């Protein structure tokens, strides 16, 4: 893992596209909120989705200032501290796959996700 | 007037030439025509109207345009000629009237009224009548103004009911029509003509002069005064009529606006509600967006809670284990110390040999030191984990986000519903200009005041004219004494015309009064025969030719059913035909709609006697062939059915 | 064709206003009015009424 990779969080092209759509639709104030939401979806299913073609999206320092994300992931999964953000990326990828269909249809609703998990 | 034959060609639903005859033999004077609605019954009535007067009317007496008179299938086949011929007898003469409509020269495919030419030809006993005299000839047989009492359609009944309900513009029209039927206008015209001739004679008399030139000058002066006064009277009367007309037109418009105004107010309220809902919806969306950053935790809230619970119970367990191992270690220390000193570390008493053996045995079994550090590490880890988990326990925004979304949904649905309602309301009334309404109201008020003023002015002017006329008549009488022969003739003419003017003037009211009484008597007689209600004693006619039903105590019956209205209207028709110069023809289109069975029977039995010739246009629903027609079966001379060939074509078939 | 009811009314008023005016004159005047009721040229009715009156005056010695 490169230094850059250690200090950043990335997404696949696909995930990146979903993030852009969510930003354009104004569902979340910031893209970081959307990314956290995707991680949470993946975490709630306990499923990681590996991917290739990584694009850097955020710096860890600004994304997880209070280490809440890493804390939750560590609390709910058996993860090595050094791997927690890699795990986060794969959890987010799962989340993007769940979000993509409703975003494409223009029918994103929190209700659907909050009541099914 | 008695109809003989009607031929229609390409007229409304009748494609090609179709013929009907109307025989009258002995007491058989009824021609029956059956046809369901929209098949062509009313078109037959219109064919008669068109051949006689060149006009065809639809609902509410609206004129139907030429292109709609032409049969659609004929138009499609490029056969653009419409022709209706009517042969009839009147006053011992036989007439043939033909009206034709065709495209103008060079018009290949006519599309509107301007593309058509219409012409009429008429023969009396085989001799052609000059074109410009045809209208006058028809006017002497069956004037258009009273034709509605011979061509009696269902709408006339409704208009008549309006006449009784209130005095509206349409009721004035009916009143006019009734007075024409009774011959009142001939007297009114006579009055006008005599007045005009009197005026001319007076001028001539004044011009020819007389021996007394001073007297002549006075007469001329008075005549000039009279002319000026009459001019002014005419001017004021015309102004009064035009202002009244404008006021009535405004009334009609304002009535339409009242409805539009109430719709406008509802629209305004609706739009305000929509705006409010849109604000609520936007706020809900904003709220959702502001809560969105916390949504990720809401997703995991139950997992976190479960994990916290688990950590808490494991922590408790670890704490218990740790305390247990600490206690063991302390006991171990105490035991060791006791064994070494030979006395109890706590109470300082010498150890018994049994105690020594026990302590030694325990020492060989236990070594608590290792456990303490393990438990201590576990405790620290679990405590950290729990602390982290507790740190995540921010207020869950899940339910608040869902609430915001549901509010958004609710308001979106409400907004959609209201917008639909808005569209419906907007369609009900095209643009409403509130400023325009206000202007019209103000104008109306102004006109009302004007009318009041003009009314007094007209009366005053009439009195003035009468005064001057009297003065002039006196002067004429005084001058007539010493005249030359020709001047004497003029003077006699002036005197005669003065008398005639007064006679015609007073006769108009007298005639109205007489005829109303005549109509009332005849209508009452008919009414008593037609009604099944024995409590009704008769009818009374008011100034508007409205008929009131009187009961056996001579009180007005105020609540009348639709059926009763029809009977009253039919009674009026019959009363009029008895009191007036009746054309002897009655063509009735669907007259039975609102009559119950009993009344239907009465009316049907009576109808053949209402005129010399009766044509009934009926539909199945109105009159049953077996039950109702039995009442007139022995009076029917011919029967026809209008058969539907297609939506654009019907055919007249003799039965 | 003469309008009977109108003629009757004229006669009754004539009896009150000027009994010397003959019924025949009134009848002839009414005949003109009825015949010309729907003529679009009002001056024709006026001329004919005038002719009736002149004829009457020439024929009678008193008014």
Image: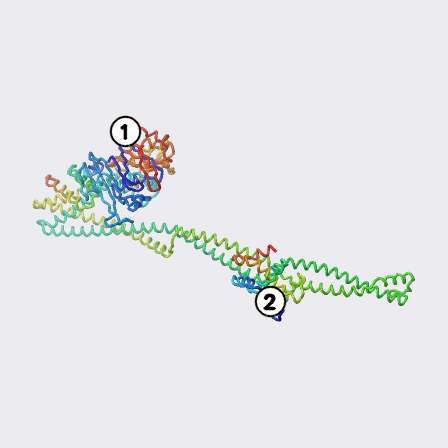
- Quarter where residue B442 is shown: bottom left
- Whole-angstrom CA distance, mark 1 to mark 2, is 109 Å
**Residue under label 2:** A9
- Quarter where residue B18 is shown: top left
Q: Which label number is shown at residue B27?
A: 1
- Quarter where residue A79 is shown: bottom right
Pick out the residue farthest to the front: A52
User: Circle 1 sits in a helix, a strand or a loop, which is it?
Assistant: loop
Which residue is located at x 66 percent, y 58 percent? B305
Chain under callout 2: A
Task: Count residues near mark 2 (Cα–Cα under 10 Å), then give few for <14, some for 14-19, many for 20+.
Answer: many
Residue C37 visible, this angle: no
Chain under callout 1: B
Quadrant for the C terminus of chain C in the image: top left
Q: In the image, B593: left or right of B336?
A: left
Q: Nearer the viewer, residue B346 or A97?
A: A97
Quadrant for the N terminus of chain C in the image: top left
């Amino acid at each position: 893992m490169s230094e850059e990779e250690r200090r950043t969080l990335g997404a696949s092209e696909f995930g990146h596209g979903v993030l852009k759509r969510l930003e354009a639709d104004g569902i979340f104030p910031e893209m970081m909120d959307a990314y956290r939401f995707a991680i949470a979806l993946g975490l709630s299913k306990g499923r990681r989705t590996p991917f290739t073609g990584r694009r850097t999206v955020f710096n860890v320092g600004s994304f997880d200032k209070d280490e809440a994300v890493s804390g939750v992931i560590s609390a709910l999964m058996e993860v090595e501290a050094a791997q927690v953000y890699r795990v986060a990326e794969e959890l987010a990828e799962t989340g993007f796959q769940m979000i993509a269909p409703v975003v494409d249809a223009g029918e994103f609703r929190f209700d659907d996700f909050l009541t099914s998990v | 007037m008695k109809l003989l034959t009607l031929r229609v060609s390409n007229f409304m639903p009748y494609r090609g030439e179709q013929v009907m005859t109307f025989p009258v033999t002995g007491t058989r004077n009824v021609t029956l025509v059956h046809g369901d609605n929209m098949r062509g019954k009313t078109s037959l009535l219109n064919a008669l109207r068109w051949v006689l007067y060149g006009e065809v009317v639809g609902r509410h007496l609206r004129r139907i345009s030429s292109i709609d008179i032409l049969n659609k299938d004929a138009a499609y086949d490029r056969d653009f000629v419409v022709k209706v011929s009517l042969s009839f007898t009147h006053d011992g003469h036989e007439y043939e009237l033909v009206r034709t409509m065709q495209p103008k020269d060079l018009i290949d495919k006519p599309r509107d009224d301007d593309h058509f030419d219409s012409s009429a030809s008429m023969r009396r006993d085989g001799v052609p009548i000059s074109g410009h005299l045809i209208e006058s000839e028809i006017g002497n047989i069956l004037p258009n103004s009273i034709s509605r009492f011979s061509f009696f359609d269902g709408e006339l009944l409704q208009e008549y009911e309006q006449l009784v309900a209130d005095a509206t513009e349409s009721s004035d029209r009916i009143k006019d029509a009734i007075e024409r039927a009774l011959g009142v206008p001939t007297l009114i015209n006579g009055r006008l003509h005599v007045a005009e001739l009197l005026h001319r004679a007076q001028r001539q008399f004044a011009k020819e002069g007389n021996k007394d030139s001073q007297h002549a000058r006075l007469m001329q002066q008075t005549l000039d005064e009279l002319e000026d006064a009459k001019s002014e009277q005419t001017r004021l009367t015309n102004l009064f009529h035009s202002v009244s007309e404008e006021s009535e037109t405004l009334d009609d418009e304002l009535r339409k606006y009242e409805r539009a105004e109430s719709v406008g107010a509802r629209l305004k309220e609706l739009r305000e509600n929509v705006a409010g809902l849109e604000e609520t919806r936007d706020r809900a969306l904003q709220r959702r967006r502001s809560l969105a950053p916390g949504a990720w935790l809401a997703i995991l809230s139950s997992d976190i809670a479960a994990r916290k619970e688990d950590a808490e119970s494991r922590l408790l367990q670890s704490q218990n284990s740790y305390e247990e191992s600490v206690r063991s270690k302390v006991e171990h220390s105490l035991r060791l110390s006791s064994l070494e000193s030979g006395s109890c570390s706590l109470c300082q008493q010498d150890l018994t040999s049994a105690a020594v053996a026990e302590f030694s045995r325990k020492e060989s079994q236990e070594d608590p030191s290792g456990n303490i550090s393990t438990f201590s590490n576990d405790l620290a880890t679990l405590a950290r984990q729990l602390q982290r988990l507790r740190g995540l326990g921010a207020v869950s925004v899940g339910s608040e986000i869902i609430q915001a979304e549901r509010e958004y949904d609710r308001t979106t649905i409400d907004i959609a519903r209201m917008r639909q309602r808005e569209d419906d309301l907007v369609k009900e009334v095209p643009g409403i200009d509130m400023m325009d309404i206000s202007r019209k109201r103000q104008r109306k008020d102004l006109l009302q005041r004007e009318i009041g003023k003009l009314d007094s002015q007209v009366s005053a002017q009439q009195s003035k004219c009468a005064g001057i006329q009297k003065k002039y008549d006196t002067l004429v009488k005084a001058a007539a004494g010493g005249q030359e022969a020709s001047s004497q003739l003029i003077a006699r003419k002036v005197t005669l015309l003065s008398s005639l003017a007064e006679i015609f003037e007073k006769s108009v009211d007298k005639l109205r009064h007489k005829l109303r009484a005549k109509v009332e008597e005849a209508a009452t007689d008919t009414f008593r025969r037609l009604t099944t209600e024995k409590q009704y004693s008769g009818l009374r006619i008011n100034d508007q030719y409205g008929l009131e039903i009187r009961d056996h105590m001579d009180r007005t019956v105020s609540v009348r059913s639709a059926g009763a209205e029809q009977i009253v209207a039919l009674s009026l028709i019959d009363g009029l035909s008895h009191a007036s110069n009746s054309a002897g023809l009655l063509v009735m289109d669907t007259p039975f709609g609102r009559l119950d069975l009993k009344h239907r029977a009465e009316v049907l039995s009576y109808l053949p006697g209402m005129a010399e010739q009766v044509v009934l246009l009926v539909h199945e629903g109105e009159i049953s062939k077996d039950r109702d027609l039995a009442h007139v079966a022995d009076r029917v001379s011919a029967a026809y059915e209008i058969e539907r060939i297609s939506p654009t074509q019907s055919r007249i078939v003799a039965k | 064709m003469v309008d009977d009811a109108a003629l009757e009314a004229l006669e009754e008023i004539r009896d009150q206003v000027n009994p010397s005016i003959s019924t025949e004159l009134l009848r002839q005047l009414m005949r003109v009015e009825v015949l010309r009721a729907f003529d679009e040229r009002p001056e024709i009715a006026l001329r004919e009424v005038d002719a009736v009156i002149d004829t009457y005056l020439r024929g009678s010695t008193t008014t």
